[in-house]
Image: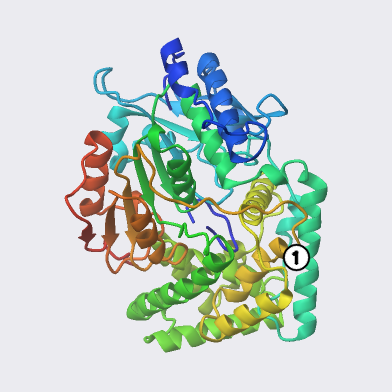
Amino acid sequence: MRPTRRATALGSAGAFVTATLIAGVVTAPPAGADARTGKDAEARGVAVAAARAAEKGIDWRDCPEDWGLEKPIQCGWVTVPLDYAKPNGKQIRIAVDRIGNTGTKAERQGALIYNPGGPGGSGLRFPRRVTTQAPLWADTAKAYDFVGFDPRGVGHSTPISCVDPQEFVAAPKMDPVPDSEADKRAQRKLAAEYADGCKERSGWMLPHMTTPNTARDLDVVRAALGEKKLNYLGVSYGTYLGAVYGTLFPGHVRRMVLDSVVNPSREKIWYQANLDQDVAFESRWKDWTSWVAENDAAFHLGDTQAKVQAEWEELRATAKKAPLGGVVGPAELISFFQGAPYYDSSWVPTATVWSQYAAGDTQALVDAAAPDLTDTAGNAASENGNAVYTAVECADAKWPTSWKTWDRDNTRLHKDHPFMTWANAWMNLPCATWKSKQHTPVEVTTKKGLPPVLIVQAERDAATPYEGAVELHKRFKGSRLITEKGAGSHGVTGLTNPCVNERVDTYLLTGKTDRSDVTCAPHAVPKP
């Protein structure tokens, strides 16, 4: 879940399966079910598609050069139905990649599939944790092929679009915080035009851009890999994808790690979840600005949180009056600065650039926050990521259509949580005028066959507030929750914290969890 900017991170042996496994993949619909309509038709459709994929396998090849994936990573395609109620209808292709396990044949436990979040994030870089020798993943890599994929609509998997990419990144944009009713009308117009653009450019895909359909795609990928059961690591939105998969396919789960959890409650998906995010971002913003104040000797931005906040407000006002370098206004500042509440790895770089600006180097901040119009590939990826984010969140659930509701809720929240509230509102507002079907979210729950799931969460996460992990923990019986107390970086499994890392390794390698939930001390705070 990423509010205004999508910098990602808010391989299996393709053996053909035997007829026995194919039989295990195909599931007949419940007795008396109407196979032509509703969820039963989709259940039958995914079984048909999975059996087809299991028989075909994946034709692994060297990855296309422009994908940026070095050997020995291999790439391939899995074909899935656009509409699972019509498994023999229009098909789309899902891009997948893999790197084999680094251990022996005897050590291999299958494929570990990864989703980094979004919606709209690509998982194709996951096998690079092996080629770049990421130390946290060395033990897991001995046992598993690392498999990444682009979800439907993303990247190389039948990508969708809502607007010309160069237009999408053009700056400066309007200040997200409205000064008048005229400002609100202008933002509403932009949001409606964006929704119209999605319909115009990608309308044929929009009704099918749902989390349940991506979960079904995941099950077809599992079958194509020759895996009877899924091993899965999901971060951020990837936790919601995992939660929906675990609900729809409980008997197909072997191991599942869900890190930085989207609240799966039907009441939260997605309108309320974004409002909750605004509150959490304000708390984490204060954590970061307090840290900047504690390190005033390095950054010279104020020796109290209040002074640093005042410095931010002055910077924002300056950029509003005259965009820095002609391109960096308040919207671009929020997009750049939100990296700090998201990820601790952004604390030092963001503060350093701000410190350079305060010392008179405006260009450093312009370079960091302005779009690069020469990076056409990167801009296309950003636009595609935003399109998928919008399409999935708008299609997954019904959103308020009354502007009065949006105006009331965001005006109220903004008073005490000004950092992100209005920026988040405008980003999601296309869902109020969405021109395609909006569904009812899956009721995430424990069904027969679901094994223990490992949930990992930082207590002060801004993008996915802590309550989401607690809610999923309640819904998935037998799950274990690891809480990183006092920490707030998004994506805990990618950080060095032995208390967390060792438990994730143990679970993935042995299936074992602690007898009860665990609270870990926070990882080390960044140092200037």
Q: In this rendering, would 368 be left or right of 98? A: right
Q: Quadrant of the C terminus?
A: bottom left
**Badge 1 amino acid:** Ala
**Tag 1 residue:** 191
Whether residue 76 is visible to the viewer of this picture, yes or no, is no
Where is residue 60 drawn, in percent x and y? 52, 18
Q: Residues within 10 Å of mark 1 (few under 14, many from 20)?
A: many
Where is residue 243 drawn, in percent x and y? 44, 48
Q: Quadrant of residue 85?
A: top right
Residue beneath the point at 36% across and 41% down: 256
Q: Is residue 184 above or below residue 232?
A: below
Decide which of 87, 231 is in the foreground and name it. Answer: 87
Where is residue 416 drawn, in percent x and y? 51, 85
Q: Quadrant of residue 111?
A: top left
Whether residue 439 is visible to the viewer of this picture, yes or no, is yes
Q: In this rendering, would 34 be left or right of 235? A: right
The residue most toward the front is 32
Where is residue 10 drawn, in percent x and y? 49, 56
Give SS at disc 1: helix
Decide which of 217, 40 is in the foreground and name it. Answer: 40
Residue beneath the point at 26% across and 63% down: 522
Residue beneath the point at 34% across and 57% down: 474
The residue most toward the left is 515
Residue beneath the point at 37% across and 68% down: 460
Q: In this rendering, would 331 be left or right of 19? A: right
Q: Is residue 491 above or below residue 336?
A: above
